[in-house]
Amino acid sequence: MSLGTAVIVGVGPGLGLELARIFGNAGHPVAMLARDKAKLDTFAKELALTGLDARGYEPAEIAEAYLELDNQAETEWQHELVY
């Protein structure tokens, strides 16, 4: 059974990033949403170095992100997103 994707909104260097680590370490793919895409990309690379699957999205991409996540959840992770 695959775990659901953790969608974390408002990710910054503190609580949001730590939540991404916690959910990632528990086996969840992580989608991080925030205004600063460059920071999210940095966070995603940092998490990837520890073997976690995390991706960043900015607000302008949120609708796109949910569609992409829904598709990715079905095709790659074989589960549905829970909102």
Image: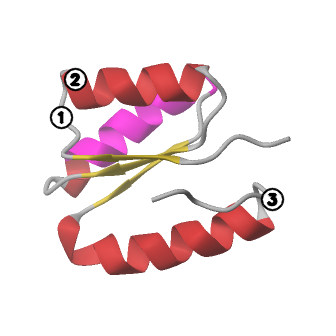
Indicate which disc residue 12 carries: 1
Which amino acid type is marked by label 3?
Answer: Gln
Q: Which residue is mark 3?
A: 78
Identified at 42% across, 71% down, the residue is: 65
Distance, label 2 to label 3, CA atoms, is 28 Å
From the viewer's perspective, tell me whether residue 70 is left or right of residue 6. right
Q: Is residue 74 left or right of residue 55?
A: right
Name the foreground residue: 39 vs 62.
Answer: 62
Q: Is residue 51 visible?
A: yes
Which secondary structure lies at badge 2?
A: helix
Q: Position of residue 30 (x, y in %)?
A: 50, 43
For residue 15, the mark is 2
Q: Earlier in the sequence, mark 2 or mark 3?
A: 2
Tell me the amino acid under the disc marked 1.
Gly
Work out which residue is located at the far left of the displayed protein and give it. Answer: 35
| CB-based contact (under 8 Å), mark 2 and mark 1 | yes
**Residue 50 visible within the image:** no
Instruction: Name the element at disc 1.
Output: loop
Mark 2 or 1: the one toward you? 2
Is 16 displayed left or right of 12 in the figure? right
Say few, some or many: other residues with alpha carbon within 10 Å of mark 3 (under 14 / 14 to 19 / 20 or more).
some
Highlighted magenta segment, given as a residue range: 39-51
Considering the image in quadrants, where does the N terminus appear?
top right
Q: Position of residue 37 (x, y in %)?
A: 23, 56
